[in-house]
Amino acid sequence: MKIPFFDYPAIYNENRQKFIDIFDDVCGRGAFILQKDLKEFEESIGKFLGVKHAYGVADGTNALILGLRAVGIGEEDEVIVCSHTYVASAASVYYVGAKPVAADIGNDNLLDPDDIERHITKNTKAVMVTQLNGRTCNMDRIIAVAKKHGLKVVEDSAQALGSKFKGKCAGTFGEFGTISFYPAKTLGCFGDGGLVMTNDDNIGKKLYITRDHGRDYDGKMVAWGTNSRLDNLQAAFLNFKLISYKEDIKRRREIAMLYNNALSDIDDLKLPPAPSDGNHFDIYQNYELYAGRRDELRQYLSENGIGTIIQWGGKPLHHIESLEIKSDLPKTDAFFKGCFMLPMHTTLTDEQVGYICDKIRSFYSG
Ligand SMILES: *Cc1c(COP(=O)(O)O)cnc(C)c1O
């Protein structure tokens, strides 16, 4: 059996004819930029998330940059980020002229609320949480620390569309939140795409204006802006995919349960939490686990046709030399000695998941 880590052609071939029809419909109408499909999508996804303002933008990175600008982060400011995140979290801080400062992970492998205070200086303005792998941080604790020090909370929720903490969606806790529609994300489009959201009317207006050259609701230029719009064609594909999105999450949670049940007695592994553990609702963008014998195990799985990857090429932010974000983060360092990810996507069959689990078990029994 051959099981790639992610199957890119499958996301198209699953509904090929439907996508061709959508392409033909949208292009036939000449509806390319800021048209009704985008408006529809923004309304539906805003409702799904329970957020007041949701705007389609060029990609998840631009969503972060627009968000940071809208809340007034800029030169001289520092923003605390989790070191276990994609470079885009920190890059967005850098691109608005501020300085990203890396903090450690907690036992849940997400930003540790207890490690925030250590990194606060007189310039710290905000904490950017990453709702990583489809899991939302314990936002009660993050917000409490931020409040105590007068810091803004902003969310890189690129990987967490529909993930919840205490029934509330990732991206709706902070001043703004973001989503990425990169093809391998839980709701992927056929290229780049993103969303920025907020419950604050003032921030919402700024986001609306800046993503389209400073144009207000009536088309009048009222401020400096940029071009960071989600293509109407991508929005049309996403409208279709959003219909079955809840089913997709259900399937991801099922796969996570299959992995958890089959692998929980292997001492060398540390598995991610169960789908509804505690106050969390996990959507499993990724199934990231820890193995003491990671490199041998990955080699064995690869020989058996199973693709796995180590997130961020194995380097948390504070070890990417060119970024010069140095920090002493023992828990992140320890985790990166053994972390990796098993295949996790909706086109995986139970049989394939069973095969992966069997191979892992035979590695440890051999
Ligand atoms: C994917 C991702 C982004 C960036 O999204 P793009 O749409 O690729 O720009 C940012 N942060 C995290 C955690 C991501 O996984």
Image (spheres, rainbow, N blue to C red):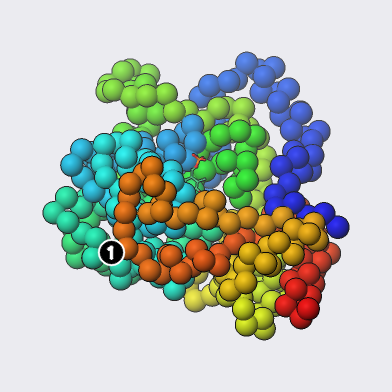
Question: SS of the residue at dot 1?
Answer: loop
Counting other residues with Cα less than 10 Å from the Cα at mark 1, is it few (<14), some (14-19), or many (20 or more)? many
Residue 240 seen by the camera: yes
Hey, which residue is sitting farthest left in the picture? Answer: 122
Residue 366 relative to residue 46: left or right: right
Residue 339 % position (x, y): 55, 64
> What amino acid is found at the position of numbered circle 1 in the picture?
Ile
Give above or below for 35 relative to 278: above
Please report the residue visible at 23 percent of the width from the left and 65 percent of the height from the top.
118
Residue 49 seen by the camera: no
Residue 3 relative to residue 59: left or right: right
Along the line of sight, which residue is nearer the eye, 133 or 76? 76
Residue 100 % position (x, y): 30, 48
Q: Quickly name the residue at label 1.
A: 116
Residue 171 % position (x, y): 43, 52
Please report the residue visible at 43 percent of the width from the left and 65 percent of the height from the top.
333
